Structure formats: structure tokens, C-alpha cells
Amino acid sequence: MSMFQHADILLKEAKTCLSNISSLNHRLNALISVRPPESVLTRVSEVALKCTESQSGLAGKLFAFKDNFCTIDQPTTCASKMLQGYVSPFEATVMTRLYKIAHAIDVGRANMDEFAMGTDNIFSVYGPPLNPLYSTPRSAGGSSGGSACAVAAGMCHFALGTDTGGSVRLPAAYCGVVGFKPSYGLVSRHGVVAFAQSLDTVGVLARDVQTVREVFNVISAYDPLDPTSVSNELRRQLQTNTARRRQASKGKYKLGIPLEFIVDSCSPDITNAWAAVLKKLLAQGHELYAVSMPSIKSALPTYYILGPSEAASNLSRYDGVRYGYRANVDRVANGVLYGVTRSEGFGSEVRRRILLGNYNLSSGAFNNHYIQAQKVRRKLQLNFDGVFSVDHPLEKPIDRDDQLTVDFLVAPCSTGTAPLLSDILSQKSPLDSYVNDVLTVPASLAGIPAISIPWHTDDGKVVGIQVMGQYGDDDRVLDVSETIMSL
Amino acid sequence: MRIYVRPRLFGTRNLGVFRDVIRWASATAENSYDGLKCGVEIHLQLDTKTKLFSNSRTSFQATPNEHVSYFDLALPGSQPILNKHAVLLALKAATALNCKIHRRSMFDRKHYFYADQPAGYQITQYYHAIASDGILWLQRRDGISSRDKLGVRITQLQIEQDTGKSVYEIDSDKSYIDFNRTNHPLIEIVTAPDMKTPREAAAFVHKLQILMKHLGVSTGEFQSGAIRVDVNVSTNGGKRCEIKNLASINDIIYSIRAEYSRQLNQVSQGRTIESVTLGWDGHNISVQRDKEGSLEYRYIPDPELPPLLLSEDIIRKTRDNQPKLPDELIDELTAAPHGLNLANAQTLLSYGLVDYYYASYKILEEAEIKGKNAANWIINDILGIVSAGEEKLLPSIVTPSRLTDLIIAQKQKTITKIIAMNVIKYFLQNQADHRVTAEVIDQYQLTAMADGNILETICSNVLEEHSDLVELVVSGKKPSAIKFFLGMVMKNGMGRFNPQDSEATLKRILMAQHPEYANSQK
């Protein structure tokens, strides 16, 4: 294909995206700020003329990014009143890599739950995005609801989100797109506004696995500015492992059904879809095993102790003194310093989680809650190590019976399909939303790669099927995803 | 109510602060402080180029907010990157204090809201500090008087961030924050309550300052805020009270005395001592806040910082590479063959000039020049003419070989002492000139002159110019006025004539011109 033909295609795709934005965004509310279309097209032309098709698969492609990735040209607000108008003086590393290495072009900032806390994207200062698959107002999932919505609505080729307890996988499941959470530490978090730093992971959303893989390859790199970034040495080892394992498995896998993921709250749509996928995989010649990880039962409360604790810590910086929203007074008579600013600047869910986190960190509760939760987290990771046939690259190998181990786990992502927004808003307790995370938090706590693949049922529904792999086995998790998508 | 009257401050010269300490340390024995127990908590700024978790520069009195990075301001999305040099300095400090080094230590967040704490938390080491269980030994020459030896136990040494600085303006309802100091690396050193008198506490702090400065860990100065001291005081096994933010050695002594009195007063009036936090304003001790109603700090290990793991290798290397410590150096300097007195030995040490002295001494020894020349020149002469801080340049500019050349030349009467001092000043002001002493002396024709004719002429001229004063000398009304003439001769002769010759010549001329003076001199 000639350079001009390629440029032509890129421009055509870009125009389609931009047209979708202009016709749909007003209703869907996926993007909370939109780049002027002319500037996007100009950029596409520039890039198209400079890069050939072979140079970078993402050159000239359009993407949206969640409003918690810092850029230097527009405010980064995290969908919060607290950061309205805040323009960061530095850019997130992943943004720089997408701009400068991939030559991708952004179309705007995606809606999200405030400070990434939420499962339906209803806690946004901009209002919720709507799920584009339905005509009734349904949840796009959270907290990366805007990113999933933008991809599903054809507003861009791919989007960036963050996944702390399922915030990329759940919206991907609801909106019928691919949502990938890589192994913790592979993608730099420098310039990503922190919610819970030991859980936050940059994730990718797209309509196909190939695009996800291309984006992942660009953004997965050692970053000396991120203290939790995985070293080049380990990355090389992971690559070697991948090559070796691909050779050994020859495309046929041992897949695990985690028994603790069979929960009562799962709707028939979900369990039927799960069963259908497994049947097809079996028919294709893969092996299926039932596996048990007892600590999964404690995963949800563990997450809701650790996540809010870290959040309470990370959000202590928002006081309006150096940046962000500041109330008219720093304190009312006999009041707490910054109490007014923080009560007014934070939304209800953020305030709830900060209170919960502070409670868990207070000296009375610390040993019983926080320390215990950390211990359970460790146990959960060991449970995963016990079922995967692949060793954890950072741990001493543990004894396990090869007969009873699997390469990957296949499970649902959510307990139901996208709920009606009216149902969510009429919930009695905010905790009712928390249980949505039960299937996604295990992989978050263990830091292992996990992905949601859209599975279309015979009766026209779309369900997210989750694949999880051992820490560092990201490339092969994507391999399995491709297999499932082609079933 | 003034509880203790603070004496007049001793005068200060460039040796001043140090001399003060020697004076109080060697003064008469302290009053008895029965039942008193003191422990100290010291915050020491580490002498690193950059901050603890970011690479903005450390500074003192720089333009406000000139050395501030994204992480220092706790901008969203900023992250900590550990400065390993800070860890090394902490390790050196812990080793010199005979601490147990923990191969695995962690960084924790201590949460509280305050304007000078941008993140809303301080990164410190609460649960697992880098070192503990050390000891520092004091002896009488360190300023303790009630016993021969005191071992002060170090319970913990931890690495942590410094805070920013609040600046209050008079007549304004605004306060300002300077974040230059935010995230400056600190070590906090906590001791057991092993000190039983105010002087013991002061001696400990002072010894620690000298030790840390000697190691290059910290400048250890109060004036720049490199050292901040809190003291815990208890009497007769009662609850302890904390005096915060003491800003000098004297403050330590006087505040402990005042607090001891206050506690005894309380008890004698039948009240129990409550655990309170106190402040010292230079004259009075005052209660600040209830220590027990302390803040809930919600300590949590920092999720982004991995445990600090030290290899056996680095711990061993730090121990093996430890330079001679002050105690050993003082022992050496005060013993044969150097035989310096304690004050001079301490001076050399406190100015970091021990190696410089040793090198100069060695050269002179090899040239078979006997006597305490190197020590006398450095301490009595050179330190008197350099400005504050300039002494740091001596080893590299007025090198031991340049210095000893001057000493030898003066001993051989090639040049006078005054010329030598001028040459030293010349070296310091002309650092680009790398020539040896002899060349400089030659070029500027600084050699001592013995030409009697020239000296005669200079003396005659001086006496003529100031004939009014001649009368005072020869009449015997003010014989010491001859010193004035001598000064003029030295000046006009550019210091090239030695004082004895100059004075002899002056007198000879006067005696020749004024017979009555000649008679009075017989």
C-alpha cells in the first residue's frame, strides 16, 4: 500500500471517529472535553505523511484518555470539583510515549468516577456517561466508563483507563469492548493521579485484541521516574519466558475454572455465557480444570479495607493551598483545618471512602483491619501461585502438583450485564455497588494480568469474559484473548 | 514569672561559639539535680546535594520556593525516588553511633494536616527504622562534670523528610509557606533518658554535632536549622514532659534547669506531673499542649516505596571505611609527639583541619624543624585572618607545602611573619595563581630586608612626619608611643623589616637626636 493510500485510510477513519463524537457525545457524555476536529485532522495528516504503515501500527490512530492522566495543555480534573482548572506542569509518561513514540493522536478526555472511585461512573462532576449499546440509559461501568463508552461508540480506536479494583475490565464488559489490565508495574504510573498506589494499574480499551496489544507494547516500558516500575532485567526475563512457553504450549492451553467465582449474585446471562465459552474452548481442544482458591472469598472486604486506606492517604494532599479548589475559609470556628475545602471539593463517594480508609488506619483498627487485610492479600497471591502452572517470576517457586495447575483462568467479569441507571440511583446503600467488584478485585490484589473479552450471546446480549494469567504472563493472556474472540 | 536568670551572652568571634562551649564545659561543677532524667530527640539535616525523594536541590536561605520539585509540592501524579546518598549518610551516622543496622527497614507515612506538609503526610520510618540500639560515650573533657564516663544509649535512628517553613509577617493576617525545606533529608536520633543533668544533655548534643560534622553527615549547626533538639525531662520517675524546638546549647541547659524547677515546684505543692509539651522562649518555660491528646497519625507503610534492603557488604564497608573519630583524633593530638592542649586540639577538629595539620606537621618533621609551629600558625595566626567559612579553602589553596614553605622561610628569617600572613591572604584571594611560595615571594620582592640604610631612612622619615609625637616619647610622658612609630615603619617598609630591628633603629635615632632620651634609656 502506498503512503498516500495509507494516509487516506487514516484520514477516513479519523473523520468517522470525529463524526461519531459530534453526533453521539452530547447524549453519551463519554468525553468531558473534546479536541477541535480540525486540529485532530491536521495532526493525522502530519503523522500520516511522516510514518509508513510498517513503522507503527498506532501512528495516526485516535485515542481517548481518562481524566486522571496528567497532560500539560489542559486541566486534569479527575472528574472532581477539587481539581477544576488544575493544569499539570508535567505530562504522564504513558501520554508522552503515545504522543512521541506511537504518534497517536488524542481526541479528548474521557469521563470517569471522581478520583477513580466507583463502579458505574455515576460519581462524576460531569454526570454519568451512557452505555452506547442500549437505548435505555444504562451504566457504562466504572470508573473508566467514559473510556469504554468512547471506544464502544466508535469515537476513537482505543482508550486509556486505570484499573484499581476492576475499573477497566468492568466498563469494558458492560460496553462490549476489550479491556486489559496488565501486570502491576509494567506500565508507568508517573503522572497518573493516584487513588491506591499498590493497586492502580494503567489499562487499555479497544474493540479488538490486536489494537490492545499494540498499545500495550508502546506503553509497557521501564520508567525511572516511577519507583514501582519493573526493571529492564525482569522484562527481558519475562520475554524469554513468553517465547519459551509459546513454543511449549503450541496454542493449546490448560484453562482453570475458579470455583469461588461461582457466586449466587451472578445472573443467568452471565453464567450461561461463561458456560458457552468454556464449551467452545473445550471443543477447540483446550483442557478445562476446576480450581479452588479459598482466599478469594475474603478478597472483596480485603480490597475495601486496603483501597480506601490508601485513598485516604493519597487524597490528603487536596487542601487548596497549592492548587485546586479552595473554600472561602480554611477552617470554621472550632472546625478542622481544611474541613470546608475538602467537604465542598470532594463528592459523596470520595468522602465515604476517605472516612472508611481513615477509620481502618486509626490506631484502634489498624492491627485488626489493615494488617489483617494485608495478610489476606498475601495469602490470595499465594493461592494464585498455587494454581498457575507458571512460576511467579518474583517469588521462590512453590511446590505444586503439575496435574492440578493451569495456564490461565477463565471467569466472568461482572455479576450481571449493564444495569439501568435508575436502578443504581435508587439503591438503598452505596455498598450495593461494592459487590459488583467481587469478580475483579482478586486479580487487582494479586497484581496479575487480567482482561475482559466481549462475548456476544445468542440472544443478542454482550457479556464480559475474564481471562487471568500469572504475573508477567501478559503476552500470553492476550494470546488466549485472541483465541476466545475468534471462537 | 522568670524562673531562671540567663547570664550575659559570651562574645563571639569566628571561634566564638565553640569557645563558649569550652568555657561552660570546664566551669565549676554543676548543682545537683537529684532525680532528674533527660532524653533527647534530635533532628539532623543530612548534607546532601538533593532532597530525600526528589532531585531538587537542598538549600538554606535561598529565594523562597526556588528549589521545589513536583513531588515536593505533592502535585497529583508525582512520585518519590529515593536519594541513595541520604541513605549512605544515615548509615555512616548509625555506624559511628555503634548502632545495630537493620538490613531491612521501611518507609511509613505519618499523616497530619498542616500548611507546611504538602502531601498531608510525612514520609518517615515508624515501624522499622534503619538503625537502633547504639551508644555514644562522653568523658569529662566533653563537658560532663558529675562522672568520668557517660554512655548515652541511642534507641532509634530513622530517615525522614523535613517540612516546609511557615513565614509569618508582622501586621498581616497572612502566613506564607516556603517549600524549599520540604523533603530535605533528615535523620531523627532518639536517646534513652540517660542524662542526669542539664550539662550532660548539652554535652551529648554538642558531641553529636561535632561527630556528625566530622563525618560529613551534617553541618550540625543550630543557626541554619541543620540541628533541632527536643528534650524529654522527668523527675523522680514521674511522667516525662517534652520541651520542643531548642535552638542552642544554652537553650538546652537553661530550659532543662527551668523545667526541673517547675516539676519540683509542682510536686512540692502536692500536684502530680502531667505529660505535657513545653516551649522555651529564652527565659521562661511554658506549657504548649497536652502531650497525651496526641494526634492520630494513621501510620501506613508507603505503598510506593519498597523496603530498604542493605547488603552485608555495604554495612561492612561503611564500618571499615569509617575515618578516625573525634575522640581518637583528640587523643592523638593531645599526646606525644603533638602534645597540643585540649582547646587547640578541639579547635583543629571543629574546623576540619586535622588532616591539614598532620600533613604540615609531617613536612616540618622531615625538614627537621622542631616545635609546635604548624599548630601555632594554623590556630593562632591563620584562623585569625580568614573569614568565616574560608578555612574550608585552606587545605586546597594554602596547601601544606605552601604553608610549610612559609614557616620555614620565616624561621630562616627570609621573610617576616607579617609578610607570611600577607602571602597567605594573597593565596586565598588569588586562587588561580598556583605558583609555589618562593616564586611569589620573589616576584613581589617580599623578602626580609636587612639593609640598614633603607631602614634608617624609613625611620628618620617617620620620626620627622610625626615630630609632635616624638616629644611624648623622649620626654618620658608616653613611652609607649614608640609603638605607633613602629607601626608606621612596618607599614612604610611593607613589613619587610623585622620588628626588633625596626624598634632598635628607631631608638638609636631618637637617642642620637635627643640626648635626654639617651640618658633615660640607660
Image: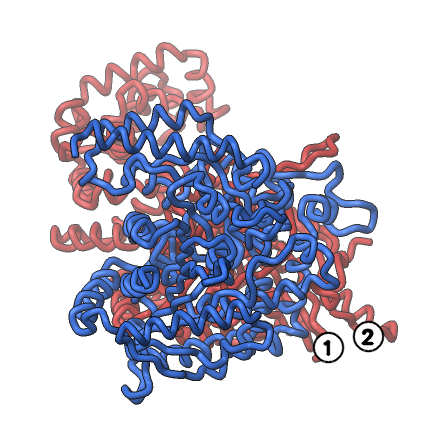
Chain colours: A blue, B red
Residue B17 in view in this figure? no
Q: Quadrant of residue A454?
A: bottom left
* Dot 2 alpha-carbon crowd within 10 angstroms: few under 14, some 14 to 19, many 20 or more: few
Between the residue at mark 1 and the residue at mark 2, the CA separation in whole angstroms equals 8 Å
The front one of A3 and B124 is A3
Quick check: B471 left or right of A358? left
How many marks the image carries: the answer is 2
Q: Chain of mark 2?
A: B
Residue at (44, 28) in percent of width and height: B480
Q: Secondary structure at mark 2?
A: loop
Residue A72 in the figure: left or right of residue B6: left
Q: For this view, does B414 lie left or right of residue B250?
A: left
Expressed as whole percent of the image width and height from the top left, the position of residue A117 reads: 58, 55
Task: Mark 1 or mark 2: name the one nearer the start of the chain.
Answer: 1
Q: Which residue is mark 2?
A: B272
Residue B511 visible: yes
Residue drawn where x is 71% and y is 79% of the image: B236
Rendered location of residue A188, percent (x, y)? 37, 52
Image quarter for residue B370? bottom left
Left/right placement of residue A380 relative to residue A317 reads left
Disc 1 vs disc 2: Cβ atoms closer than 8 Å? yes
Q: Quadrant of the C terminus of chain A?
A: bottom left
Task: Please give the residue where the numbered disc 1 appears in the rendered image.
Answer: B238
Q: Quadrant of the N terminus of chain A?
A: top left
Q: Residue at 73% of width from left, 77% of height from top?
A: B238
Badges 1 and 2, same chain = yes
Q: Looking at numbered disc 2 in the image, what kind of residue is underneath it?
A: Thr
Q: Residues within 10 Å of mark 1 (few under 14, many from 20)?
A: some
Where is residue B387 drawn, in percent x and y?
39, 36
Q: Write down the chain letter for disc 1.
A: B
Q: Dot 1: what SS?
A: loop
